[in-house]
Structures are given as C-alpha cells and as structure tokens.
Image (tube, rainbow, N blue to C red):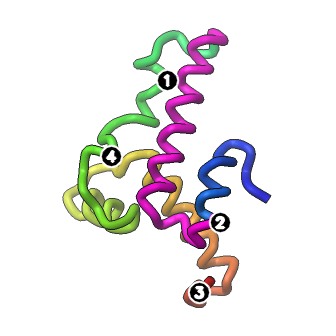
Amino acid sequence: MPSSRFEKAAALAERLKTWNHNDVAKTVRECLDQEIKNALVYGLADSETGLSVHTKGHPFNTHEFDNPAECFHSFITVGLEPPAEVMICMSKCIGEYFKAGGAAISR
C-alpha cells in the first residue's frame, strides 16, 4: 500500500517497478511543493523561506539526468546536497534493497 505522504509517487513507482525514475522524482517534488503550500495556508510556517530550507535547494527538473541515482551521485561527487526529491527516491531504493536482503531487485 502506498505511503500517504507520497501516495501518488508510490503508485507511479509501483507501476514503473522502481523509485529510480525521473517521473517519480518529479512527482515527489510536486508532493513536497504541495506540503509547503498547505503549511503556509494553515499557518504552520512563519514564511515560505523558513519552511523550504530543507526541501528546495537545487531543483531536480533543471538538470538532465537519466535517473535519480545518477543525480544523487553527481551531486555528492562535487560536494553538493542533492534535491530533497532525489534523496527521498534514493531512500526508497535503498529500503527496497535492504528488504530484498541486499540482492538485486528484479521486478
């Protein structure tokens, strides 16, 4: 069952059989942007800047990468923090790897 926080992204990842896909990362970004908007509407943040410090940064969709793993590696290699959506996708991929006991995941 998809996570409620990233339900749309989880459904897409399930259909694509991977979280390591650019469309999934872009869907995660949309979810994060919606969370920011909702927090501002409901007064849960003092300002958009204060809330977005950890969820913005370098936008994934302005760079051309084959997949979130490539983006992650490219950012880390040069000492930059990858975009939040890439970190979330990589976390999901690593989680799947651990669930599979360290074996390659073939779906």
> Does residue 65 show up magenta in the picture?
no
Location of mark 1 (residue): 51
Above or below 83: residue 21? below
Location of mark 2 (residue): 14
Counting residues from the start of the chain, the first of labels 2 and 4 encountered is 2
Considering the image in quadrants, where does the C terminus appear? bottom right
The answer to whether the residue labelled 2 contacts the one labelled 1, judged by CB atoms less than 8 Å apart, is no
Kindly report which numbered mark, 1 or 4, lies closer to the viewer in this rendering. Answer: 4
* Label 1, label 4: how far apart the Cα atoms are: 20 Å
Query: Looking at this rendering, what residue extends furthest in the right direction?
Result: 1
The answer to whether the residue labelled 2 contacts the one labelled 3, judged by CB atoms less than 8 Å apart, is no
Q: Residues within 10 Å of mark 3 (few under 14, many from 20)?
A: few
Location of mark 4 (residue): 61
Above or below 34: residue 101? below
Counting residues from the start of the chain, the first of labels 3 and 1 encountered is 1
Q: Amino acid at mark 2?
A: Glu
Query: Looking at this rendering, what residue extends furthest in the left direction?
Result: 78
- Label disc, if present, on residue 106 of the rendered structure: 3
Question: Which region is colored magenta?
Answer: 14-43
> Does residue 26 show up magenta in the picture?
yes
Kindly report which numbered mark, 3 or 1, lies closer to the viewer in this rendering. Answer: 3
Counting residues from the start of the chain, the first of labels 1 and 4 encountered is 1
